[in-house]
Every structure is written in C-alpha cells, then in structure tokens.
Image: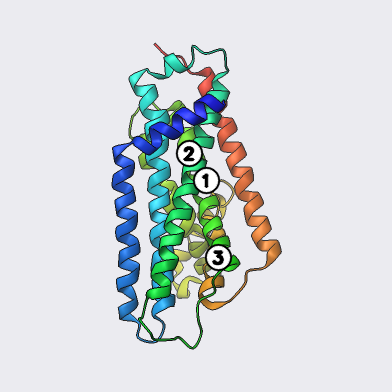
Amino acid sequence: MISFLLSAWRAGLRSRSIQAVLILGLVLVGIAYLSAAFSPRQPKTVALDVGLSGIRFSLVMFSLFWVQELVGHEIQRRTVLFALTYPVSRGQYLIGRYLAVLGMLALAAVMLGMLLWIVVLNAGGRYEQVFGVAPGVAYWLTILGLWIDVAVVAAFALCIASLSTVPMLPFALGLAFAAAGKSLGAVAEYLSQGAGGDLEIMRLAPVVDAIHWFLPDLSRLDWRAWPMYGIAPDTSAMTGSGMVALAYIVLLVTLAVLAFNRREFE
C-alpha cells in the first residue's frame, strides 16, 4: 500500500492539470485580497470569507483531478493492470491511492491557508477593524473542516471511478456531489422556516428530507463564523459532523473497494 501511496503522490504533484488548479487557487486568493476594497469597515472579514470559499473550491477541484488522474485514467488506459500484478490486493491499491490524495489535499490546504492568512493580515492596509478576525486555532480548525469536507468528496469520486466506464463521470458527479452537499443544509433550513410562505417550494420538503438520508450535509463542516466573527461552534456539533463525515468516507471507500474487486479488466 505504501508503494502505491508514494507513486500516486509523485504522479499527482507532477500533473499539469494540478498546476492549472494551483494557479486558479492563487487567483482566487488574489480575488479575496481585492474583495476587501468593497468593504471599508470590515475588509479583513470580507477577504477571509471570500478566501475560504476560494480555498474550498480549489480543494474540490484538486480532489477530483487527482482521483481522475490516479484512478480514472489508469483504469481507462489499462495501466492499472501493471499495478495489479504486484502481490497485493486491489483494495490496498485503491486505499493507497485515496490516502495519497488525502495527503496532497492536506498539503494544498496548508499552503493555501498560509497564503490566505497573509492576504487577510494585509487586507485594508492600516485600517483596524472594530471586530478583528480570529487567528490561530479558530482559523486552522476552519481549514481542517474544509479538508474533511473535501475528503468526503474525494471518497465519493473514488467510488464512482471504481465502477465507471465513462472517463469524465467521476469528475462530473463529484462536482455535483460537492455542490449538493454544501447547499443541502441551507435548503433544509429554508424549508423548515416555511420557505417564505411559498407553497410550491414547500412541496419539495419531503424530497429534501429523503435526500438527507443519503447525502451528507457538508455545510456542517464550514466553521468560518469562528475566525470571522468569533462565534465558536458547539464542540459536540463539530465532533458530530466530523464523525458523520468519517462514517461516509469509510462507507464510500468500502463500496469502492467492493466494486473494484468485482470489476473485470479486458
């Protein structure tokens, strides 16, 4: 498994598509710096909010490209057959690839997180906000939440890649999964509050409740209110959302291994 992890790490970092996504991440962090100019009273808060959204988007793209490069393309090109000639199980191959993706995502999250924090500190020039942003533990736990969020997305993409015969399907469905999981909480809360009295929208409530049983609410892993406004999330809620995410990861990776073990390569 370690050999698969290391080879995937080297291949992922050399990928040209990843270099493009990294440039995109840098651009998004730059946009966060420029966005501070639109808020004369809270430039650092605005820059942090926009920057965290940019980091999440970049990490999602990283995860999908890496799963596509390290699993999807190897299956498509049949180069996976060379890896499977080693005296290891298919499950070890797949888990090794997934752990490599998680490691590279952690590295990307730390690098972009450090860059964003430098941008936030310099946003607004010498202007000092009345309510400053919170550095340290609050900020890095928020970055950790984004990493866990994207780890779930990567597990879903891995599951699709293990059984898909369409090259771009893991990327497309993974992107839809990331968007749906992020917006699910906001939609459910809006419906629980009556949807502004709109009866047509309220008819969707049973559908959203049913989706809750299958789709994780990734918005619960977004703790940006803590570094932005000093509103610390409930510890039990943070722990619970982390455990639910871990359960989804274990389930999705297990399904991926089962599907990969049953797959026949011509």
- Write down the residue under mark 3: 223
Badge 1 or badge 3: first in the primary sequence: 1
Mark 3: which secondary structure?
Answer: loop
Query: Mark 3 vs mark 2: which is more N-terminal?
Result: 2
Q: Is residue 74 left or right of residue 222?
A: left
How many angstroms separate mark 2 from mark 1 (CA)? Answer: 9 Å
Residue at horizontal 54 percent and vertical 20 percent from the top? 90
> From the viewer's perspective, is 244 left or right of 98?
right
Which of the image's four quarters has the N terminus?
top right
Which class describes the residues within 10 Å of circle 1: few (<14), some (14-19), or many (20+)?
many
Q: Find numbered disc 1 in the image and state the secondary structure of the residue it sits on.
A: helix
Residue at mark 1:
151
Judged from this view, the residue extending furthest toward the right is 236
Query: Reading the chain from its start, which is encountered first: label 2 or label 1?
Result: 2
Q: Is residue 69 above or below residue 56?
A: above
Question: For the residue marked with disc 3, what is the amino acid?
Answer: Trp
Question: Where the C terminus falls, by quadrant?
Answer: top left
Residue under numbered circle 2: 101
Residue 177 appears at what percent x and percent y?
A: 44, 47
- The kind of residue tagged 1 is Ala
Q: What amino acid does circle 2 point to?
A: Val
Task: Identify the image's colour scheme: rainbow, by chain, secondary structure or one colour.
Answer: rainbow
